[in-house]
């Protein structure tokens, strides 16, 4: 049984490769900040590291991790979508030491014990994924338990303000889980890291999405877990009005990164 907090269509939107790829494509095209570069700078991945990537999707972080760790390092990646793992494997350079497995992150302990070749990691990481699991605290415990001495745990999550969620909430009902995800960093992750790591750092990602047409905005909205077809017309009107006035529709889409450090 899946541990994804959503069911039905919303679960598909949260985990399916087609929705994920389109979200990434639009975010990268119209963002004011380069999330990938921002994240990698703060993770400080080094040659020879062994990395665990939980909720890896189609490889947005796994692939640059593999390049940075080089031939003496490794990346062990897990995602609930088998299609995403297939796509990840097709993108990995032939010489890279990457092992991708399709499994629910709730089963992470068993995958590490019985499937992954590498069992302990200098960096355990999850971006845009952990809050989707109803077993998130269990997963965090497993991630923490798999860290080598002197290693670190890094989790990235959405963070308020999020302009598109706020617009959607004015037009229709937004799932409670969506609003909870925007508080996941400060209300769930930070207390956990305070309790379980001798030291941690928090980084805030500030980003503005600027789309030039209502069509693009609606296309992105259709990929989200808070999509409601009945709100499309009003959302399109709001976008058209703003684009007519200022030339683009802009909204904040921010994030929260916490990195916990272990003792040597």
Image (cartoon, rainbow, N blue to C red):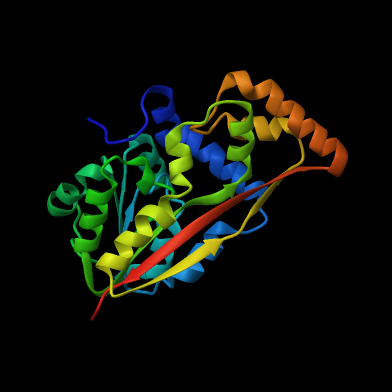
Can see residue 100? yes
Q: Which of 41 and 115 is in front in this view?
A: 41
Q: Residue furthest top?
A: 230
What x and y, as percent, mark residue 4? 32, 35
What x and y, as percent, mark residue 82? 33, 36
Q: In which quarter of the image is the C terminus?
A: bottom left
Q: Which residue lies furthest to the left in this view?
A: 114
Q: Nearer the viewer, residue 182 or 250?
A: 182
Can see residue 123? no
Check the image and report above or below for 17 versus 60: above
Number of callouts in the render?
0
Q: Which residue is drawn at 18% across and 57% down?
A: 117
What x and y, as percent, mark residue 80? 32, 39
Q: Is residue 101 left or right of residue 59?
A: left
Q: In which quarter of the image is the N terminus?
A: top left
What x and y, as percent, mark residue 191? 33, 61
Q: Which residue is drawn at 65% across and 23% down?
A: 232
Q: Which residue lies furthest to the bottom in this view?
A: 264
Q: Which residue is drawn at 24% across and 62% down?
A: 144
User: In the picture, residue 221 is in which quadrant?
Assistant: top right
């Amino acid at each position: 049984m899946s541990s994804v907090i959503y069911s039905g269509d919303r679960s598909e939107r949260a985990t399916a490769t087609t929705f994920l790829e389109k979200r990434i494509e639009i975010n990268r095209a119209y963002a004011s900040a380069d999330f990938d570069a921002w994240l990698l700078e703060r993770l400080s991945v080094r040659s020879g590291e062994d990395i665990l990537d939980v909720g890896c999707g189609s490889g947005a972080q796994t692939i640059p991790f593999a390049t940075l760790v080089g031939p003496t390092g490794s990346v062990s990646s897990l995602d609930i979508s088998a299609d995403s793992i297939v796509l990840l494997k097709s993108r990995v350079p032939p010489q890279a030491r990457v092992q991708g497995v399709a499994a629910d992150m709730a089963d992470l302990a068993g995958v590490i014990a019985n499937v992954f070749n590498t069992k302990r990691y200098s960096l355990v990481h999850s971006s845009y994924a952990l809050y989707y699991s109803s077993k998130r605290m269990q997963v965090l415990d497993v991630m923490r338990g798999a860290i080598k001495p002197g290693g670190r745990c890094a989790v990235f999550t959405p963070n308020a303000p999020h302009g598109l969620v706020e617009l959607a909430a004015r037009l229709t009902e937004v799932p409670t889980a969506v609003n909870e995800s925007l508080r996941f960093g400060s209300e769930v992750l930070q207390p956990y890291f305070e309790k379980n790591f001798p030291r941690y750092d928090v980084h805030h990602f500030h980003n503005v999405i600027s789309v030039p047409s209502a069509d693009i905005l609606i296309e992105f909205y259709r990929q989200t877990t808070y999509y409601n077809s009945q709100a499309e017309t009003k959302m399109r009107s709001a976008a058209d009005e703003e684009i007519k006035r200022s030339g683009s529709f802009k909204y904040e889409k921010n994030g929260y990164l916490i990195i916990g450090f272990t003792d040597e």
